[in-house]
Amino acid sequence: MINKPARRATSSRMNGTTTILVTGGAGYIGSRLVRDLLGRGYHVRVLDNLLYGGDSITDLAGHPRFELMVDDFRRLLAVETAVRSVDAVVHLGAIVGDPACAIDPDFTIQTNLAATQLLVDQAKMAGVRRFVLASTCSVYGASDDELDERSALHPVSLYANTKIAAEEALAAVRDDALGWTVLRFATVYGKSNRPRFDLVVNLLTAKAVTEGRITIHGGEQWRPFVHVDDISRSIVLALEAPADLVSGETFNVGSTDENYQLSKIGELIAELVPSAEVVTNAQIHDHRNYYVNFDKLRDRLGFQPAHTVRSGIAEVVDLVTLGHIGSYQDARYSNHRFLTEIAPERRSLVGAGD
């Protein structure tokens, strides 16, 4: 990896860029990012087949700088049309999460890898200047070391493997005109316009509030965490930073201070929901274990999260207590349950956000 100059990014407004394509813009992260980009004056085009529904962006219909393409980013014609006349691409669309990816491995590979390659190729041909790929800290898999962007990857899931392959497809680009950046997100949590309760902080908090009991499996596993709004901010930073700071670079997205063992997540939830009982089960279902260093993003782009896990738990407590989401167990709020219970026949119509 080539080390870039150790100077902080200042907003370049992408040197005049006005139009950004967001794949999966109706998803958990995408629905937050689209609003942030519109708020900063960009024109935003979303490519999403609305597999999980379009409620997360319905209120944006009619916005003068918002365009929605309901289509599948695996289709050549759809991608050719989507990248036309855009200055940057943020590729969020994917089958997201280990359980969801395991439902149909061939389908997952086609969506997470083959479609990414198609999008990268078409972006190059269309003269796109920036390409930001959403990846995950799950690529680190299982390790007892503190990990940074130079660390070896030890994936333990299909999801992580497809993200590594997508990163490699982007890194293989030999075109200086396309400045690409990989963002490896920590485990996400928090309130979004497309709610999800298959994420550990959100799920355990909702269970604590509604059922008064949560179970931590194992508990010693380390995991880094980041709020969905902070992920959106990191993407904006990557888009607006001077090209020499971000082109051809990979960044972990999160905060080193926000690495927690899962047992600590249980303790934090118990502090904020004191009526809840926390039970520890020695059996480990998820063998991922990684403590991640995020100094590069902080030092290079000046990124500092605005949220903590504690504040995120409090946010979800309010969300559930006030009844804004109905039942957290609704299949709409779980990628795996939705794909298996509600929309198995729609797997041929992918292009959706997470």
Image: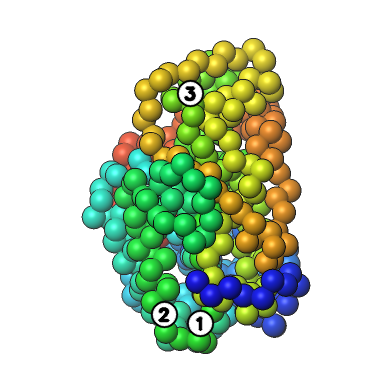
Residue 227: percent from the left, percent from the top? 63, 45
> Mark 1 or mark 3, which is nearer the start of the sequence?
1
Mark 1 lies on a secondary structure that is: loop
Q: Is residue 35 above or below residue 283?
A: below
Which residue is labeled 2 in the image? 173
Relative side of 151 to 231, left or right: left
Within 10 angstroms of label 2, few (less than 14), some, or many (20 or more) residues? some
Task: Depth check: give the residue in front, 259 or 321.
Answer: 259
Residue 90: percent from the left, percent from the top? 53, 67
Within 10 angstroms of label 1, few (less than 14), some, or many (20 or more) residues? many
Residues at badges 2 and 1 in contact (C-beta under 8 Å)? yes
Relative side of 318 to 86, left or right: right
- The colouring scheme, among rainbow, by chain, secondary structure or one colour, is rainbow
Which residue is labeled 1 in the image? 178
Residue type, label 3: Ile
Residue type, label 2: Val
Please tell me whether mark 3 or mark 1 is closer to you in this view.
3
Q: Look at 42% across and 35% down and name the residue there.
A: 331
Q: Look at 41% across and 43% down and name the residue there.
A: 142
* Tag of residue 216: 3
Q: Look at 46% across and 41% down and name the residue there.
A: 144
Within 10 angstroms of label 3, few (less than 14), some, or many (20 or more) residues? many
Relative side of 310 to 91, left or right: right
Residue type, label 1: Leu
C-alpha span from label 2 to label 3: 42 Å
**Residue 94 visible, this orientation:** no
C-alpha span from label 2 to label 1: 8 Å
Residue 75: percent from the left, percent from the top? 33, 70
